Amino acid sequence: MANAIEVRELVRVFGTQTVLNGINLDVKEGETMVIMGGSGCGKSTLLRHLIGSLRPTSGNIHLFGEDISVLPEAEMDRVRRKFGILFQSGALFNSMTIAENVALPLREHTDLDHHIIDIQVKIKLELVGLREHAEKFPSQISGGMKKRAGLARALALDPRILFYDEPSAGLDPVTSAEIDQLILDLTRKLGVTSVVVTHEMDSAFTIADRMVMLDKGRALRVDTREAFDALRKLPEAEAAALPETERLIRQFLRGDAQGPITERKAATNYAEDLLGTGLKKQPPSAITPTR
């Protein structure tokens, strides 16, 4: 099976901070890849590189065989028409109806007759179960419905890849499960490649074909859902003998309160703060004292 996405030695530096540190990742056509990890691990930064909104400090990203890390912006716009993005908030325009939101990419990027666009909008809304709500405004629908409307808009141009940024964030468990099922159904019906950024483990283990665990800008492990599930379910006695990296991944997957992640947090910052070595140098006062 060919690769839809290839990431090679991706590095991103902001100032003195290395946020992504040598990421290598392949996403196969038609599969669902889940990108997971704790807050600040680099998930969102990686996603922004995959959609071309950030350029690497070094390394390469190939989408559809094209190296987007060196493409001019005009060429990048052409590539972006081949993928869709479901933003964490849905990112709908509040002044437009749901149907108008979904129609927007078609009106902006195609020359289709408005009758054809209306038909396409109805088809996309039917796929996400919102056709009967087409004339409502975002303020008139629930959070889960906004996510589905955002997904319908992401599907408007019949993309080959769908990117999801925390699709279950802020949703109740039942609505979250409905979104997971919708992702599975769309992947099966449309044959699209899906890349999902999430820290919700229930969702990750429901939708993933393969998963990548990020930590401090590094890809600790890329493997199948079954392999990660086996690590998650490994008995404590056997897990104690694992290397630290594997124990760290297992702690994250299980949400355990004790393990390498919490030990690392406890071991840092406090000593520096206590001794003053972690304090930033204070800027000079803007006011000169008179005595």
Image: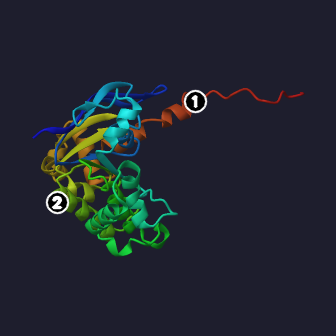
The one of 47 and 128 positioned closer to us in this rendering: 128
| Residue 121 found in image quarter | bottom left
- Horizontal relation, residue 263 to residue 244: left or right: right
Residue 70 in percent (x, y) is at: 34, 26
- Name the image quarter holding the C terminus: top right
- The answer to whether 133 is drawn above or below residue 79 in the figure is below
Q: Give whichever of 35, 253 is nearer the camera.
A: 35
Estimate the x, y position of residue 188 in percent, counting from the top left: 16, 58
- The amino acid sitting under disc 2 is Lys
Residue 287 visible in the snapshot: yes
Q: Earlier in the sequence, mark 1 or mark 2?
A: 2
Report the disc number at residue 16: none
Quadrant position of residue 142? bottom left
Residue sitting at 37 percent across and 63 percent down? 149
The residue wearing badge 2 is: 189
Cβ atoms at labels 1 and 2 below 8 Å apart: no
Left or right: 246 with respect to 227?
A: right
Using the image, tell me which numbered label, if any, was put on residue 276: 1
Q: Quadrant of the N terminus?
A: top left
Give the residue at x 19% y 62%: 185
Question: Secondary structure beneath disc 2?
Answer: helix
Q: What is the basis of the colouring in this image?
A: rainbow
**Identity, as a three-letter code, of the amino acid under mark 1:** Gly
